Structures are given as structure tokens and as C-alpha cells.
Image: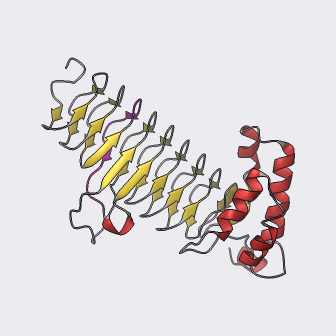
Amino acid sequence: MSNIHPTAVIADGAKIAATAQIGPYCIVGANVTLGENVILYSHVVVDGNTTIGAGTEIFPFASIGHRPQDKKFKGEASRLVIGERNVIREHVTMNPGTEGGGLLTQVGNDCLFMASTHVAHDCMVGNNVILANNATLAGHVSVGDFAIVGGLSAVHQFVRIGAYAFIGGMSAVEKDVIPYGTVKGERASLDGLNLVGLKRRNVERERIHALRHAFKELFHGTVGTLAERAEKLKAEYTQPEAAALIDFVLTDSSRSFCTPATKSDREDA
């Protein structure tokens, strides 16, 4: 194929669409599938049971689909599935799943992974997600649609990041981040709602207003636990954003939630 550079190494068995482009010194493993118009620019290595969707671009020195960085991995037939129209920049690493996480790591469509970002085993990344430079997702992390993870941030294993959430740069995220929430800090705390992101997506003012009220009642209320307040509010808020926030709080998770910093937390910082 004229769109595969002669220095590229393509293993027997790889499934490559006729319109895919593979640049100099790329290596593609035997169980890899590249969709239409996928571009591997140069020095890209794709291995494992990896599927890359149409229109995705991968830049030099990315390592995609190699075995997970997990000592429990014993060579099981796990997969990495990457959707369409993603941009995966230099030195990005993405690993397939493990038996302990359903044998699948999955990335949605239209995401941007800036240089040196990492997506570990069993992560579930939605659509239109951005990971800024050197942001890292540990194993089993889920990231909702349109979420942004700032540069040099690290997300603890099994953490959930809700849709439209914003993680400030250089944050360490050890707890779940609510949809539409903004968190930041060396040990990240909830800093309010991502109102800028909501306005950019042209969310109606009335819906933002309802979300702000629900947020205030959940995280600044004084009666009952967070879960009890969410259960009480469930019937009251039917607007999509507020309902998504309440449902997220009520969903079982192995992690607690990022909450607003207390006065003592701020003084210690």
C-alpha cells in the first residue's frame, strides 16, 4: 500500500483500512485494527488487541496497547478500544484492560490527549474529553463526556470523574468528582461548578440555575448525610444537569466524593 511507509513494520494479521496512513518507523502488531483515515505519523507503536476508530491521529513516540502496568496481569486476552476522530499526541501511553476490570479499556470519540498523558488499564473515557499535558489516569478510572483534566494532574484508581467536570492543573484527585464540578489542589477539593463549560455548551440559564440550587443543597446542606440529601432531592429536580448530579451522588462507588474545603483545610494549605 502506497500510504504505508517502507520503514514501517506491520505484523501479519493486522487489519488496516485502505485509507489509513502509517508513517516512518511505526510498528503495528498482529491483533491491531486501524479504521478508515487513521494516521500514525511516525515512530508510533500499536500492539495488543487494539482497535482504533476512523479519523484518529496518533503522533510520534506514542505507545498504544502494550500490556498493562499491573502485576496482576497474566497475559489474559484483554482489549483496548479507541473511538473515532481522537487526537493522541507525542509520548501518550494507553494500556488494555485486565481480568479484574472487565478486560477492556475504552476511549470514546473526539477526545484530545496532549503530550505524555496516560490512560491505564480498565479506564472508561467518554466523548470530547481533554487530558492536558502529563495528566495521568490510574487503573479503573471513568471519565464522563466533555470532562477536562488539567496538566500534571493525577487521578487515583477507581475514581469517577463526572461529565463536564474540570480538574485544575497539578491536582491530585483521590475522590470522585461530581458532574459539572470544578476541583483543584494538591489533594483536590471541590471548588464549585464548571459554569464556564456549561455556558460554552449553551446550557439554558434556567437549567444552570437549577443545577446551582441542587449543588448548594447537596454540598452546603446541614441536615443528614450527602446521600440522604441526594435521595430527598431526587424527586424535586428533573432538569437534566441537576438530575445527573443527584444520580451520580447516589451511584455506588468505592471512593468518597471531592467536597468543598473546610476553613481548617484552607488554613492548613
User: With respect to residue 153, does 1 lie above or below?
Assistant: above
Q: Is residue 118 among the parts visible in the rendering?
A: yes
Q: Please state if 12 lies on the left or on the right of 222 as rendered.
A: left
Q: Residue at x 63, y 65 (%)?
A: 185
Spot occupied by residue 115 in the image (x, y as percentages of width and height) = 43, 44
Foreground pick, 171 / 23: 23
Q: Is residue 135 among the parts visible in the rendering?
A: no
Q: Residue at x 84, y 55 (%)?
A: 210
Q: Please state if 183 lies on the left or on the right of 34 as rendered.
A: right
Q: Please state if 222 lies on the left or on the right of 185 as rendered.
A: right
Foreground pick, 78 / 262: 78
Spot occupied by residue 186 in the image (x, y as percentages of width and height) = 59, 67
Tell me where residue 168 sits by quadrant.
bottom right
Q: Residue at x 54, y 44 (%)?
A: 127
Residue 62 on the magenta segment:
yes
Q: Please state if 210 lies on the left or on the right of 253 as rendered.
A: right
Residue 31 on the magenta segment:
no
Quarter of the picture holding the C terminus = bottom right
Quarter of the picture holding the N terminus = top left
Spot occupied by residue 71 in the image (x, y as percentages of width and height) = 27, 71
User: With respect to residue 40, does 249 lie above or below?
Assistant: below
Tell me where residue 55 sits by quadrant.
top left
Residue at the far top in the pictured view? 2
Residue at the far left in the pictured view? 12
Spot occupied by residue 36 in the image (x, y as percentages of width and height) = 35, 27
* Predominant secondary structure, magenta span: loop
Q: Which residues are magenta?
A: 54-68
Tell me where residue 68 sits by quadrant.
bottom left
Foreground pick, 109 / 151: 109
User: With respect to residue 45, does 93 lie above or below?
Assistant: below
Q: Residue at x 25, y 36 (%)?
A: 43
